[in-house]
């Protein structure tokens, strides 16, 4: 059983980034069947084939352990190592495996100042005082989504800050922009976040369900930001 966060990330990588099932499974450390269940692979007419055994399979533990210790080691040097141990396959096949297994560099300690068009947006609530509704005095709120690259803004005024209004604001923005950003950033909003401890964050399952459906990723706003 995987978490809602993992399911949303799997669906984003498959539908938005067009990663292959095997690539997602390797990157997230889950089984291929888990990935297929998350993307609802049974909807497709053509079933995803399981990888066939290769000559390199017996040497994968060596390749993986070596790359963990020496992540910048060249594929040609690894080829010499496995060939001395009996590998008879091609270096091309090894290069493909090395690209998949090579550890990803650690995240940078600063927020990048530039993003690609359509890559990122930020969602937040704003308060705009009070309004009279009949005999009642109601707080006036506004859901705002801003595209990081173009600074285009969509706003939806509401009389509350409930989760339903929060999700409706997303749909309104997606319709206005006629597109869905790949990543949406959230501050420490009650509508989006159930719990946050430092950089560790737990998003609301309903928000993750929406992100999984529209193939985007929910991410927390960094603790500091450069502009």
Image (cartoon, rainbow, N blue to C red):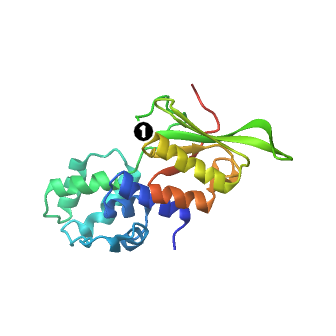
Question: Looking at the picture, how far across and down is residue 62, in whole percent?
Answer: 31, 62
Find disc 1 in the rendering and name its residue. 118
Residue at 52% x, 74% y is: 1
Circle 1 SS class? loop
Residue 194 visible, this angle? no
Q: Is residue 160 left or right of residue 47?
A: right
The image quadrant of residue 53 is bottom left
The image quadrant of residue 143 is top right
Instruction: Answer above or below: position of 131 versus 171.
Output: above
Which is more toward the observer, 28 or 95? 28
Residue at 43% x, 60% y is: 10
Q: Is residue 84 left or right of residue 205?
A: left
Quadrant where the image shows the C terminus: top right
Question: Looking at the picture, how far across and down is residue 127, in whole percent?
Answer: 74, 38
Q: Is residue 26 left or right of residue 4?
A: left
Disc count in the image?
1
Q: Residue furthest front?
A: 134
Question: Looking at the picture, how far across and down is residue 9, in whole percent?
Answer: 47, 57
Q: Residue furthest top?
A: 227
């Amino acid at each position: 059983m995987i978490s809602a966060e993992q399911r949303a990330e799997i669906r984003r990588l498959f539908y938005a980034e067009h990663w292959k099932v095997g690539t997602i499974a390797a990157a997230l450390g889950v089984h291929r069947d888990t990935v297929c269940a998350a993307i609802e692979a049974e909807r497709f007419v053509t079933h995803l084939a399981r990888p066939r055994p290769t000559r390199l399979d017996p040497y994968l533990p060596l390749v993986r352990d070596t790359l963990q210790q020496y992540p910048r080691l060249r594929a040609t040097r690894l080829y010499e190592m496995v060939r001395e141990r009996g590998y008879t396959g091609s270096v091309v096949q090894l290069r493909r495996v090395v690209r998949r297994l090579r550890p990803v560099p650690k995240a940078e300690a600063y927020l990048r100042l530039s993003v690609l068009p359509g890559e990122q947006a930020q969602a937040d609530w704003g308060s705009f005082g009070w309004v009279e509704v009949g005999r009642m005095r109601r707080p006036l709120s506004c859901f705002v989504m801003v595209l990081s690259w173009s600074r285009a803004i969509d706003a939806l005024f509401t009389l509350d800050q409930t989760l339903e209004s929060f999700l409706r604001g997303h749909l309104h923005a997606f319709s206005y922009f006629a597109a869905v950003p790949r990543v949406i950033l959230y501050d420490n909003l009650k509508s989006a976040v159930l719990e946050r401890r430092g950089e560790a964050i737990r998003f609301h399952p309903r928000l993750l369900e929406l992100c999984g459906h529209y193939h985007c990723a929910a991410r927390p706003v960094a603790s500091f930001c450069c502009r």
